[in-house]
């Protein structure tokens, strides 16, 4: 029977030290996968440690700067040295920069693109050669990649990631490798914890479900896209945003007319 279980599969998750990435790594371990969790810290972050001895799968930690090509090469060589085929890659690592259009510098864009776009590209280039038919890549975008969101560097990087994802789905499809994107909305993470109260209130006002999301709710969609249940799904973009991107700004109009 086709299921969400990933026993015997090896999955690499970037940006796994906290928030969404840590939740994804923990859920994948529970589903039976061997998870290679990566982040900037030299040692395994505390948020990951409680999944280390999970009864189903296995969690291993590797330090990785996703914007560093040599780091990806070292990771690929390490995986090969263990004889492991890569069955899944979750390009979750991401950073934000909140400068507005007339204030953002080219350096701001380059820094954010280095992680959010180049990091995903390097991951695909490095690990796709270790993948076979049935492998799955999940890129973590954002509702900012579906809308005209205000932080210019972050927003443009997530729109660029959409293009990379679609191109990768096209190029890797003949090899049986699927590539999909999830677009989280306002999820309670360390990244969103610093948002201004006004941002929180305005975002919730535009979210039909009327609440923020949890990291486990994003992780569940990632698990689905890595599992055999989604074996004919590629090039898809799935918002996990409580409906925020669904109405094109019409919610405020609808609410005003009630």
Image: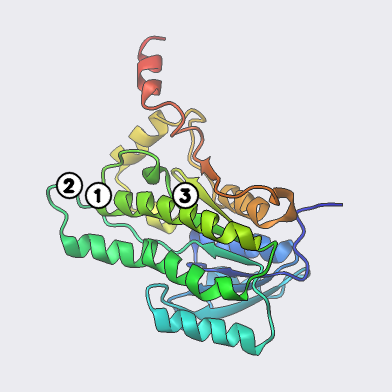
Which residue position holds label 3? 188
Q: Residue at x 43, y 56 (%)?
A: 164
Residue drawn at point x = 68 percent, y = 48 percent: 232
Tell me if residue 45 can be seen: no
In the shown orientation, is residue 147 left or right of residue 43? left
Q: Is residue 231 left or right of residue 101?
A: right
Image quarter of the C terminus: top left
In-image side of 139 versus 58 (left or right): left
Q: Which residue is mark 1?
A: 152
Q: Position of residue 37 (x, y in %)?
A: 57, 72
Graded by Cα atoms within 10 Å as few (under 14), some (14 to 19) or many (20 or more), the crowding at tag 1 reads many
Model colouring: rainbow
SS for tag 3? loop
- Which of the 4 quarters of the picture holds residue 115? bottom left
Q: Which mark is residue 101?
A: 2
Q: Secondary structure at mark 1?
A: helix
Q: Residue at x 38, y 45 (%)?
A: 145
């Amino acid at each position: 029977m086709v299921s969400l279980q990933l026993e015997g599969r090896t999955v690499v998750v970037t940006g796994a030290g906290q928030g969404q990435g840590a939740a994804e790594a923990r859920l994948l371990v529970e589903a039976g996968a061997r998870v290679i969790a990566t982040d900037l810290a030299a040692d395994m972050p505390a948020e990951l440690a409680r999944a280390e001895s999970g009864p189903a799968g296995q969690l291993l930690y590797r330090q990785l700067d996703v914007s560093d090509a040599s780091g990806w090469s070292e990771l690929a060589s390490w995986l090969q040295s263990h004889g492991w085929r890569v069955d899944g890659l979750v390009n979750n690592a991401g950073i934000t920069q909140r400068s507005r259009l007339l204030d953002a510098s080219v350096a701001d864009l380059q820094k954010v693109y280095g992680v959010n776009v180049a990091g995903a590209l390097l991951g695909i280039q490095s690990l796709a050669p270790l993948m076979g038919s049935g492998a799955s890549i999940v890129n973590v975008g954002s509702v900012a990649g579906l809308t005209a969101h205000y932080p210019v560097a972050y927003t443009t990087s997530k729109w660029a990631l959409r293009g990379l994802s679609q191109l990768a789905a096209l190029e890797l499809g003949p090899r049986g490798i699927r590539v999909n994107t999830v677009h989280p909305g306002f999820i309670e993470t360390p990244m969103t914890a610093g948002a201004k109260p006004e941002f929180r209130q305005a975002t919730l006002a535009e979210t039909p479900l009327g609440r923020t999301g949890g990291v486990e709710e994003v992780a569940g969609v990632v698990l689905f896209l890595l599992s055999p249940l989604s074996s004919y799904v590629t090039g898809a973009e799935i918002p996990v945003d409580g409906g925020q991107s669904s109405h094109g700004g019409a919610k405020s109009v609808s609410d005003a007319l009630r």
